Image: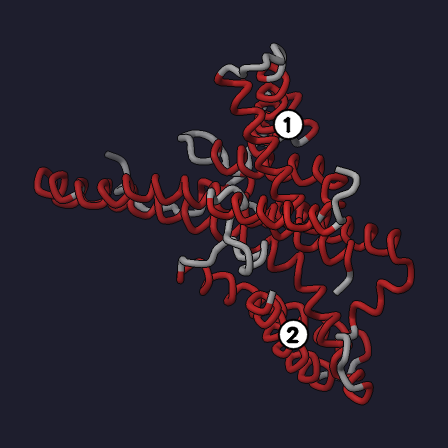
Amino acid sequence: MAAPPTIDALGQFRLTTALGPVGRSVNFTNSNVIMVLSAALLLALLAVGMRRRAVVPGRLQSLAELCYEFIAGMCADTIGPEGRRYFPFVFTLFFFILFGNLLGLFPYFFAFTSHIAVTAALAVMVFVLSIIVAISLHGLRFFTYFFPQGAPKALAPVLIPIEILSYLSRPVSLSIRLFANIVAGHVMWEVFAGFMLILTAALGIAGGIAAVLPLAINVVLVGFELLVAFLQAYVFAILTCLYLHDAVHLH
Amino acid sequence: MDEEPGGDDVSFEERLRAARGRQRLDGPPAGKGPSDPFAGSPWAIGLRVGVELVAALAVGVAIGWALDRWLGTRPVFLSLFFLLGGAAGVRNVWRVFSR
């Protein structure tokens, strides 16, 4: 062995270009590959699943219908009856993030939601969309959103900046939540896996036996990470719905 | 059916909602509101509150710092927006739990 194994917890998030010289010239990275794969999987699920359009659905069609109804229900419950209009957006967002999180769990794959640039872009998209929806539906009355109803007028100089800051913090918290959860999970995996290597390199056979403990922790973490992948995609989608609800209804 | 009073629709909707609630078809039970996706797990609640607080504070500090840099008034806007950002964080948390 040339060098003793070390824990390089953040190396897994490094971007490399894919697709050889073509990818290098346009900066097509491993992250982009998984994004395309994630979008393609979603399209394939819907296109292949709904090809038969059977009255009694088969397995794949059931899955596609279940996905549809899950998001349609989320939109209708959270945004209200108008929520159907935003269904395509929320559906795409949820499944893009979900497939991204899940694909990121496979070895040699890349979790693109572990990059704050990606999650921030998604969150800013949600933020801008909710502002556009609010202004197109309510016009300038949108700005009354920043003054809580029933509050004394004298407090306006304090309350309005606070409300505006609170509003501006939405895309920040939305993007940090997803990014931090995915990064934390992957770093924990890497740390425990690296610990196994260090143990075996340092203590030989005894270390190899002791390495069963970090291995067991990693096995538990797989289940935990699956949960986080679903939960964070769900949280992102439901918060998008909440922001759209605020945009549609104001207050 | 046309002679039925309009109230019948409402009672049907109510019964439907009660039935759906019993079968847990509508996610979290009514009353909690639709916005309680992570009730139950203390870790999730804690993480959510922490992120909301820190995000608002970070936005406030960033704006204050940028204003100071632009106007050359070093601690004035930073300290002002630090306080406002903290208040906005508390407002966020309040909003999370009051929905």
Residue A114 in sight in this render: no
Q: Which corner quadrant of the image does residue A146 belong to?
A: bottom right
| A134 vs B80, nearest the viewer | A134
Up the image or down, A101 lies above or below B27; here it is above
Give the residue displayed 48% in from the left and 55% down from the top.
Answer: B38
Q: In which quarter of the image is the C terminus of chain A?
A: bottom right
- For the residue marked with disc 1, what is the amino acid? Arg
Image position, residue B46 (x, y; %): 45, 65
Q: Image check: A127 left or right of A197?
A: right
Amino acid type at image mark 2: Ala
Q: Residue at coordinates 82% horizontally, 55% vertically from top-left?
A: A134
Q: Label 2, on which residue?
A: B88
| Residue A149 drawn above or below residue B80 | above
Which chain is indicated by disc 1? Answer: A
Please report, as a chain letter, where disc 2 is located: B
The answer to whether tags 1 and 2 share a subunit is no
Decide which of A187, A154 is in the foreground and name it.
A154
Measured as percent of width and height from the top left, residue B13 is found at 64, 46
The residue at which mark 1 appears reads as A24
Q: Which of marks 1 and 2 is in front?
A: 2
The front one of A220 and A56 is A56
Toward the bottom, the furthest residue is: A154
- Residue lying farthest to the front in this orientation: B3
Q: Where is residue A199 in the image (x, y as percent from the top left)?
A: 18, 45
Rendered view: A230 above or below B42: above
Residue at image position (71%, 70%) is: A165
- In the picture, measured across the screen, residue A176 lies left or right of residue A139, that is left
Residue at screen point 63% across, 17% down: A47
Q: What element carries label 1?
A: helix
Left or right of B59, for residue B22: left
- Quarter of the image containing the N terminus of chain A? top left
**Which of the numbered marks, if any, corresponds to residue A77?**
none
